[in-house]
């Protein structure tokens, strides 16, 4: 029998409230309080930073503050994104056994191919582009990402229905193109919207959601059933918002770690994402790790694996760091890591090497 996913639509919510509901879904599913679920969601103008990113290095905070753009930190990794009413968020929360595989790379392919197939029923040639995008003729229509937390997989996507590219460029600190990349166009030209593709034939939001559900049903071999959000989910979401995710402290948890004069930093642009290491040293000869912070737009599942690595390195002599990182990753239970262990080791060693 095909597994049944309930479908909920939480509509337009404040950015931090949306992220708190993400976490509530994960925790509710882990506790057995909800079944496998598909959620549709929308945001007012919001700049969202990835779970491990440095806030002020990614978001133009002054612009957002002056123009009423919300700022939030996701519970997933990856890079900063801009959301407004012209984008549709979709999420799947389910048990690792529900789709017959627990490999996150394989699940990413299955989910993205299913979503692309559903979107293609609208009259576009959507296709999955590894690692985790859905594109049309080389331009990104939908970005995705997710993580395992125990036996629960949380996977989300952002579908560009319509957007104001100027607002995106103003809200985010997008990287300048390298000379060799200029022929690929500006960041705004590298994405495409359903509005641009379909023009006056753009369907209503309900029809777009149904196209995605059709893709999920056919591509994932599931059934879907419309449902309502429970009081328990709403109560948990509000508690998570008020106690952590909705607070300024959580959003600015990683801000500008390189700004302090006694912090030594290094950055590596790896195939799986950018990763930076920021360290403080202590001891008479400055040969011991006092603090270490690892940031970037990589994906790690579960997200806490990075915090566990940071904790493992604190207090070690600098000469012990390389072996400690190798040992950590050989022992850690990691569902997905888009940056290789040796790349984490290399960037931490480079940060240490930048100390005088």
Image (spheres, grey):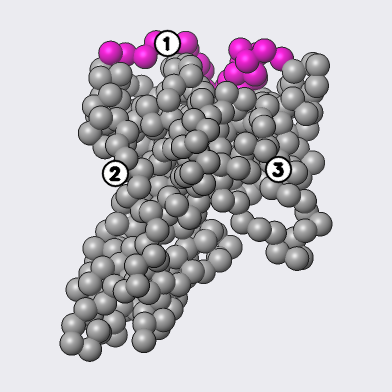
Q: Residue at 23% of width from left, 72% of height from top?
A: 290
Q: What's the magenta region? A: 203-231
CB of mark 1 within 8 Å of CB of mark 2?
A: no
- Asked which secondary structure carries label 3, the reply is helix
Answer with mark 3 or mark 1, whichever residue precedes in sequence: 3
Q: Give the side of residue 323 with respect to residue 190, left or right.
A: left
Q: On screen, 204 above or below 286? A: above
Placement of the C terminus among the 4 image quadrants: bottom left
- The residue furthest front is 66
How dense is the environment of label 3, judged by Cα within 10 Å: few (below 14), some, or many (20 and up)?
some
- Asked which secondary structure carries label 1, the reply is loop
How dense is the environment of label 1, judged by Cα within 10 Å: few (below 14), some, or many (20 and up)?
few
Q: Quadrant of residue 207?
A: top right
Give the residue pinned by disc 2: 249
Q: Residue at 19% of width from left, 73% of height from top?
A: 315
How dense is the environment of label 2, judged by Cα within 10 Å: few (below 14), some, or many (20 and up)?
few
Residue 176 at x, y percent in the picture: 66, 58
Answer with mark 3 or mark 2, whichever residue precedes in sequence: 3
- Asked which secondary structure carries label 2, the reply is helix
Give the residue pinned by disc 1: 227
Residue 138 at x, y percent in the picture: 76, 45
Res 22 seen here:
no
CB of mark 3 within 8 Å of CB of mark 2?
A: no
Q: Give the side of residue 286 with respect to residue 326, left or right.
A: left
Give the residue pinned by disc 3: 188
């Amino acid at each position: 029998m095909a597994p049944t996913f309930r479908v909920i639509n939480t509509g337009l919510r404040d950015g931090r409230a949306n992220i708190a509901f993400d976490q509530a879904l994960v925790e509710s599913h882990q506790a057995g309080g909800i079944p496998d679920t598909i959620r549709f969601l929308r945001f007012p103008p919001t700049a969202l930073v990835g779970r491990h990113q440095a806030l002020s290095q990614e978001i133009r905070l002054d612009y957002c503050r002056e123009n009423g753009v919300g700022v939030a930190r996701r519970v997933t990794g990856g890079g900063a994104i801009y959301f407004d009413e012209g984008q549709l968020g979709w999420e799947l929360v389910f048990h690792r056994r529900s789709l017959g595989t627990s490999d996150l790379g394989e699940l990413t392919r299955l989910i993205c191919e299913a979503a692309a197939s559903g979107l293609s029923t609208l009259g576009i040639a959507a296709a999955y582009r590894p690692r985790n995008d859905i594109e049309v003729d080389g331009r990104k229509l939908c970005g995705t990402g997710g993580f395992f937390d125990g036996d629960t997989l949380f996977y989300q996507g952002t579908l560009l229905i319509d957007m104001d590219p100027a607002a995106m460029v103003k809200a985010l600190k997008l990287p300048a193109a390298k000379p060799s990349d200029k022929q690929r166009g500006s960041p705004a030209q590298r994405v495409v919207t359903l509005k641009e593709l379909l023009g006056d034939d753009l369907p209503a939001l309900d029809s777009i959601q149904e196209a995605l559900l059709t893709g999920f049903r056919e591509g994932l071999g599931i059934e879907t059933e419309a449902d309502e959000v429970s009081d328990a989910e709403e109560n948990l979401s509000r508690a998570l918002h008020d106690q952590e995710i909705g607070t300024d402290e959580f959003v600015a948890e990683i801000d500008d770690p390189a700004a302090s004069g006694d912090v030594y930093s290094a950055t590596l642009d790896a195939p799986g994402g950018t990763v930076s290491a920021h360290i403080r040293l202590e001891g008479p000869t400055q040969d011991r790790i006092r603090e270490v912070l690892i940031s970037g737009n990589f994906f790690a599942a579960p997200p806490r694996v990075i915090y566990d690595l940071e904790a493992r390195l604190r207090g070690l002599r600098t000469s012990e760091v390389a072996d400690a990182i190798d040992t950590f990753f050989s022992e850690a239970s990691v569902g997905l890591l888009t940056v290789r262990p040796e790349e984490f080791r290399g960037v931490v060693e480079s940060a240490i090497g930048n100390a005088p």
